[in-house]
Image: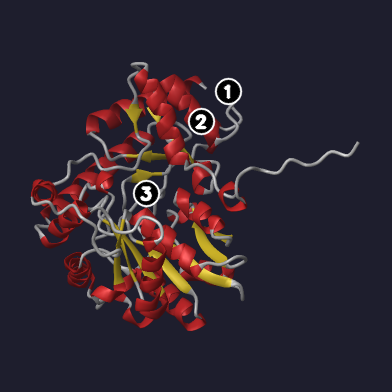
Amino acid sequence: MATTAVSSPFSARVNRIEVSATIAMTAEAAKLRAKGIDLCDMGMGEPHFNTPRHIKDAGIAAIEQNFTKYTAVGGVPELRKAIVKRHATDFGSNYTPDEAVAATGGKQALFNAIQVLVDHGDEVIIPVPYWVSFKDIVEYAGGKCIYVEADEDQDFRLTANMIERAITSRTRAIILNSPCNPSGAVMNPDDMREVLLMAHRRGIYVIADECYVYLNFTGDTQSAGSVSEAREHLVIIGSLSKSYAMTGWRSGYALGPAPVIAQISKLQSQSTSNPASMVQKAAIAALEGPQDCIAEFRADYIRLRDQVLADLTRIPGVRCARPEGAFYVYPNISAYLGRGGLKSSIDVANRLLHEAHVVTVPGEGFGTREHIRLSYATSGAVLKEALQRMKNFFASV
């Protein structure tokens, strides 16, 4: 008797994606924490600072003044003006409010931009290591990921030549992320400019994820939006989460050509609609208010980066590229693979969690298998304890 194959009850597009590696590890850590286990958390990419007082006050005032109704899908005019003005002041760009859309976090802006620009069979160039969501969002849209391996010996720094070699007649978009999550690598300004102009000449879109743009330690903070000649094929994804310690507020935006932004807004109108109204008021306060907090955050991250790098060098066999931005290190732990039953970075991360009680994220989620990601957005004391626990764990393998 013939049997009928049982198909998945879920759509093909949702079956193409996986749960975020960061979220999965955070959920596993939460289970241990609920049992009373003391964890050193270097997993979630989240500032350890509180949202600045003037930003919180603006959100509270909005609620008290009953600014709690629907707004325009892409944000109130005052917010879109604040977004373009802040970007122009800091990076010399010349966007207009109709070239900006506010979103519920930078991730939503990125998701919408990829859904708008990428169709089935389109190729999207993604440098490796990459942020966990790039791959899945592209595949959800039906696109094909074309991976470009950055050179670890050069601190994972991406060059224009690497990108150019990956371009084909099917290339629809290039995703850039500088500073990079997870490696902390920062593109050389000349290489970034060359990629932008090269893509523009060929009609290829560059989607620049600039979530960590203000956490650049090189002293040369840069935005792809500064290259005005390429703006016709450029979409910038921005976020207030890391710059202003506003992760839970969910405030992000996209800047780009007006026709692209209009399509992003159209898609948003059929999904989440406008960002929370009171969050929009807080975002305006962040963008228009004092910017001292950014410099303070950046200075502390540099200090913490240097501390964690120094501690990592004390673990035999572990080597680590020097990050120039963001708040992550991406150490290579390949010296321990094949020892003590460790076959991949997933094994390393799981055992660090359950045996050493240190939360990390395995490199598989970022496109490599020989690394783990550590967030140093925490206190110096937690870092010291975490690295000592890691040292003890690796010594026992």
Depth check: give the residue in front, 387 or 102: 102
What secondary structure is marked by label 1? loop
Q: Which amino acid, mark 2?
A: Val
**Position above or below: 201 against 333:** below
User: SS of the residue at dot 3?
Assistant: loop
Q: In this view, does 270 lie above or below 23?
A: below
The kind of residue tagged 3 is: Arg
Residue positioned 41% across, 22% down in the render: 356
Check disc 1 and report the residue beneath it.
340
Question: Comparing marks 2 and 1, which lies closer to the viewer?
Answer: 2
Q: Residue furthest right?
A: 1
Q: Which of marks 3 and 2 is in front?
A: 2
Q: Could you classify mark 1 by the number of other residues whose Cα lies within 10 Å: few (under 14), some (14-19), or many (20 or more)?
A: few
Instruction: Compare marks 2 and 1 and give the one earlier in the sequence.
Output: 1
Q: Which mark, residue 324?
A: none
Q: Do the residues labelled 2 and 1 touch (CB within 8 Å)?
A: no
Residue indicated by mark 3: 322
